[in-house]
Amino acid sequence: MSQKAEYRNAVRSKKMIRDAFIELLQTKPLEKITVTGIVEKAELNRGTFYAHYADINMLIQSMEDEIVQALYDLLSDAESPYLLKEPLSLFLKISEYLEQNKELILALMSSQPTNLFIVELPELIAKHFAASADISEDIRTRTAFMERCYFYAGGAGSLYMAWFRGTVSGSLRDVAYRLSEIIRRGY
């Protein structure tokens, strides 16, 4: 078997494992999910699971790492010299990504009380706000400016998570527009 075929098989197997895990999380609590249950649902053998993950916690960590990396890449692509003045395009990109990965995020949110990506999202957003090119170095180094960046970013992360919990109405696109308006008014 060629390396390319082996790679495709590994990617396919990981996707099947993740999909089975997400499906199981929708019907039972994490503590009731076993590797056996995952591989039966995925129609794979245990060896395939263990070839990719040491245990279920490593599977969860891997899924969270993928989300954090995707968000980091997305934010890196959203460089703008006017990010604090016009944050809508950034929030629309984040909202689109979250919408595309809604089932995965909901599953991860239900799997443990604090998820890495929930903590990482505000940190990533704050750093991008702070790096905004239209802010002078004098302002950028002020404590109050950084506190404001973290405040906006923390609020954005909280609002997104509230949407996933069902306590905020509208679509994720609506959330992006609301976040943008909040930040633009406060700028």
Image (cartoon, grey):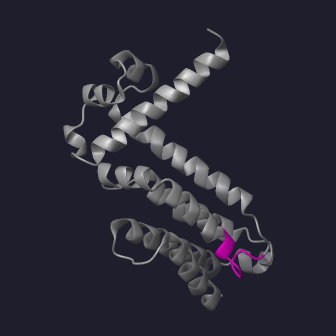
Q: Which of these two is toward me, 122 or 93?
A: 93
Q: What residue occupies the far bottom of the structure in this picture?
A: 185
- Residue 35 pos. (x, y %): 29, 28
- With 66 as the anchor, is 163 left or right in this view? left
Q: Residue at x 39, y 23 (%)?
A: 49
Q: Is residue 112 visible?
A: no
Residue 116 makes an appearance in the image: yes
- The residue located at (41%, 19%) in the rendering is 48
Asked if residue 86 lies left or right of residue 63, the reply is right
* Nearer to us in this view, 66 or 120: 66
Quadrant housing residue 170: bottom left
The residue nearer to you, when weighing 43 against 49, is 43
Residue 117 against residue 95 in the figure, above or below: above
Percent position of residue 28, x then y: 21, 45
From the viewer's side, name the closer residue of 151 and 16. 16
Q: Quadrant of residue 153?
A: bottom right
* Residue 119: % across, % down: 46, 59
From the viewer's perspective, tell me whether residue 101 is left or right of residue 36: right
Residue 48 lies in the magenta-colored region: no
Relative placement, left or right, of 6 versus 20 is: right
Q: In the rendered picture of this protein, how many numbered marks are placed on residues?
A: 0
Quarter holding the N terminus is top right
Q: Residue at x 34, y 33 (%)?
A: 56
Among the 4 quarters of the image, the one containing residue 95:
bottom right
Q: The C terminus lies in which quarter of the figure?
A: bottom right
Q: Give the residue drawn at x 37%, y 50%.
A: 108
Q: Which residues are magenta?
A: 82-89
Percent from the top left, x then y, of residue 93? 63, 64
Secondary structure that dominates the magenta span: loop
